[in-house]
Amino acid sequence: GITNDKGQILVTKYAHGHYQSYALVAGFCEIGETIEETVKREVKEETGLDVTDIQYYKSQPWSFSSTLLFGFWCKAHGDSPIQMDEKELRVARWANRDEEINSLDNASLTTEMIQYYKQGKVV
């Protein structure tokens, strides 16, 4: 999850597929890359934002693609505009803690992280 200096969280919607709910920025590791490097690269590629303060949250097996999801929190500083990669995303925007943010289901890491944010556990 990406938060900013205003305490907002970046939510996205994928450009393709049947999934219509909000998600967090996601991606896959490249060969030779650490998962922290993956976080920086994927955020930059999909949103144009540079992030710091990368902190591991937790992991979750993802049976749909036989992969392991890693959840991280990080910060985007300043007022850099979101430069959305329209091949990957159809929505990328900052959301406030009190907004209704619908996500996949209660079992997903995305939903858990959004709820964690909404409960004020992430600055």
Image (cartoon, rainbow, N blue to C red):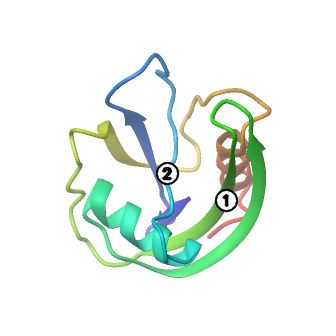
Q: Which residue is mark 2?
A: 26
- At horizontal 71% and vertical 45% (from top left) the residue drawn is 109
Name the amino acid, label 1: Phe
Q: Position of residue 29 (x, y in %)?
A: 51, 63
Q: Which residue is mark 1?
A: 70
Q: Please give left or right for residue 122 compared with residue 83 in the image.
A: right
Q: Earlier in the sequence, mark 1 or mark 2?
A: 2
Residue 5 seen in the current view: no
Dot 1 surroundings within 10 Å: few (below 14), some, or many (20 or more)? some
Q: Which quarter of the rendered picture does the C terminus lie within?
A: bottom right
Place residue 107 in its image quadrant: top right
- At horizontal 54% and vertical 38% (from top left) the residue drawn is 99
Q: CA distance from mark 1 to mark 2?
A: 9 Å
Q: Secondary structure at mark 2?
A: loop
Q: Secondary structure at mark 1?
A: strand
Place residue 87 in its image quadrant: top left
Q: Residue furthest top?
A: 18
Q: Position of residue 79 (x, y in %)?
A: 25, 71
Residue 112 seen in the current view: yes
Q: Please give left or right for residue 99 compared with residue 63 in the image.
A: left
Name the amino acid, label 2: Ala
